[in-house]
Image (cartoon, rainbow, N blue to C red):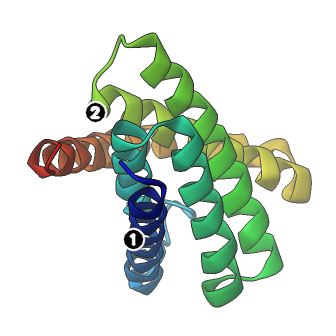
């Protein structure tokens, strides 16, 4: 793939993740368990990871977090998003490199790490009591991470080589 094509692909994937972030932003937050979201933007990051590699997935994730933060979030929202995205990306890169799991397992691991990254920020801002949400948020991460992983795997399979 030429450098120009790769740059265009990264731009397109970053735009897709930003649109998916916006769609997610339109979904009302859960009242029962604050912070649970479907994580649609992770589909674009996973597709990038499986098609272009970890460096480009990191770039797409960073672009998405910064632009979505500027457009849709407050400063604290950017902190939560950045911590969650960083934790998710580290775990996804490690799991992808280990070649033990497919896209679904990598996505579930990333979703769980995302939750704990956000809980770490919440604990710093509000105190450790937020970890009481961890079991419920982890269950949600398994469900949403699994669904997003299946979608990402289908997209990667459908893309031309």
**Residue at 35% of width from left, 37% of height from top?**
50
**Image location (x, y in percent) of residue 98:** 46, 11
What label sits on residue 12 in the rendered view? 1
Q: Measure how far apart labels 1 and 2 are at the Cα level.
A: 23 Å
First in residue order: circle 1 vs circle 2: 1
Residue 145 in which image quadrant: top left
**Image location (x, y in percent) of residue 63:** 62, 67
Quarter of the picture holding the C terminus = top left
Q: Say few, some or many: other residues with alpha carbon within 10 Å of mark 2 (under 14 / 14 to 19 / 20 or more).
A: many
Q: Which sits in the foreground, 118 or 92? A: 92
**Image location (x, y in percent) of residue 99:** 37, 13
- Relative to 107, say whether 102 is above or below: above
**Image location (x, y in percent) of residue 117:** 69, 44
- Relative to 149, say whether 64 is above or below: below
Extreme-left residue of the structure: 158
**Residue at 37% of width from left, 62% of height from top?**
40
On the question of residue 160 being in view, the answer is yes
Q: Which sits in the foreground, 147 or 13? A: 13
Pointer 2: what residue?
A: 104
């Amino acid at each position: 793939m030429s450098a120009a094509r790769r740059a265009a692909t990264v731009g397109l994937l970053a735009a897709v993740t930003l649109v998916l972030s916006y769609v997610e932003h339109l979904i009302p937050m859960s009242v029962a368990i604050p912070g649970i979201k479907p994580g649609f933007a992770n589909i674009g990051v996973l597709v990038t990871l499986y098609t272009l590699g970890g460096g480009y997935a990191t770039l797409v994730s960073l672009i998405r977090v910064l632009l979505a933060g500027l457009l849709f979030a407050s400063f604290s929202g950017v902190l939560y998003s950045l911590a969650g995205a960083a934790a998710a990306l580290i775990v996804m890169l490690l799991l992808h490199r280990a070649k033990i799991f497919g896209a679904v397992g990598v996505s579930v691991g990333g979703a769980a790490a995302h939750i704990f990254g956000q809980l770490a920020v919440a604990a710093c801002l509000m105190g450790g009591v937020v970890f009481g949400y961890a079991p419920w948020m982890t269950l949600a991460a398994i469900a949403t991470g699994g669904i997003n992983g299946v979608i990402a795997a289908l997209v990667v399979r459908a893309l031309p080589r």
